[in-house]
Amino acid sequence: MEKIDKSQLASMIVLFEVGSSSLFQLGSEADRDSWIAVLTGAGVGVMLLGMFLFIWRRDPGKNLFGLLQTYFGKWAGTVLAAMYVLYFADESMRNVRDFGDLMILSVLPQTPIFVVMLVMVLLSAYAVFQGVEVLFRLAELFLPWVLLGYGLLLLLFFSSDLLNAQHLFPVLEHGFKPVWKAAFPAIAVFPFGQMLLFLMFWNLLDNPARSGLVSAGAYAFTCLLLTVINAANLMLLGGSFAAASSIPLLQTTEVVEIPHLLQRLDPLVVLLMFAGLFFKSTLWYMGAVLGLSQLLKTGRRILVFPVGAIIYGCAFLEPNYPFHVWMGLEIMAKDVFPVFVMAIPAVLFLRLLVIRRSNPGSCP
């Protein structure tokens, strides 16, 4: 069985959670309070993370699919597991489409989108073919460079004389209701509730001790980073412009420059965008392949390219980028994904809690 260590786990959590999240103005419905909506969504995500860790700790040798089949029974567990395969594949597809559209919008307007997305899927397929250990080691290698990139961007943002803190005030002008509406369920599910996917990988840790603390620390760091990026976008662009922008982070870098030294930071944002979307898309892809191989009781590698072909083909189903974003943030994140991230795990959590209370000796 493949194994990962805690530093690789922490690296992957940061890269996965940041993913494409930094490219969007999360909680834009809350206008200048969108950064508070991010913190609120992160707070809900903390409770979800605690629930996921409890579920895993109850039977640390099993991944999500094993847990579903063990505690919901063979037939119901298999149906639910099959639904999660589709969910993971859909999430991977959404990131592939994000990458294709954002690259066309930002740096490759003359390149056919099918070529851009094919490159992403082929790279992801190669990583999934190589296995979990290789992908997590790659995350550990990439993380310092990604953090250096974001650190440089934030340093330039906050050293710029273009920042206007007044764009953050007045705080909670319309009360907390708009903030909560923006945060729940959309931000709680995307990106914070997506920690659910790590139920597929925690069982592969070479030493599970303190893994919950490591996961929580990486999660907290990501929450802070996303909140700071959100606030920086607001201070540089203003609430309405940040909300209307397709790629607020890219728009922000276009107004920041150091004369005679740095005038275009677009390539840096594109590299960060590629790194985030690659790891996020690939980890969802990996989850779908691992789950399907477990259901079909077959080797992982034989499923890599069929699953990749489905992900690639489905990325063309949505007609354009605005529809893709609307479908993802307004329909899927609010109506569909909460079933997988909140409802089903909550039922599993309650079932495990009942088992634990009725038979305390059965819990580790």
Image (spheres, rainbow, N blue to C red):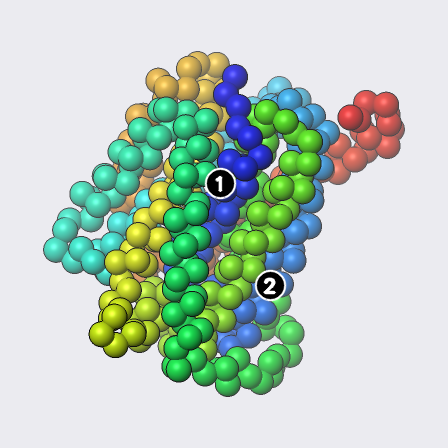
Expressed as whole percent of the image width and height from the top left, the position of residue 240 reads 41, 78
Outermost residue on the top side: it is 298
Q: Residue at x 60, y 53 (%)?
A: 220
Expressed as whole percent of the image width and height from the top left, the position of residue 132 reads 45, 27
Q: Residue at x 45, y 77 (%)?
A: 235
Depth check, front residue: 37 or 162: 162
Residue labelled with disc 2: 39
SS at circle 2? helix
Q: Amino acid at mark 1?
A: Met
Q: Is residue 253 above or below residue 90?
A: below
The disc, 1 or 2, on the residue closer to the chain's N-terminal end is 1
Does residue 197 appear left or right of residue 111 in this picture? Answer: right
Q: Amino acid at mark 2?
A: Leu
On residue 12, the disc is: 1
Q: Residues within 10 Å of mark 2 (few under 14, many from 20)?
A: many
Q: Residue at x 41, y 28 (%)?
A: 134
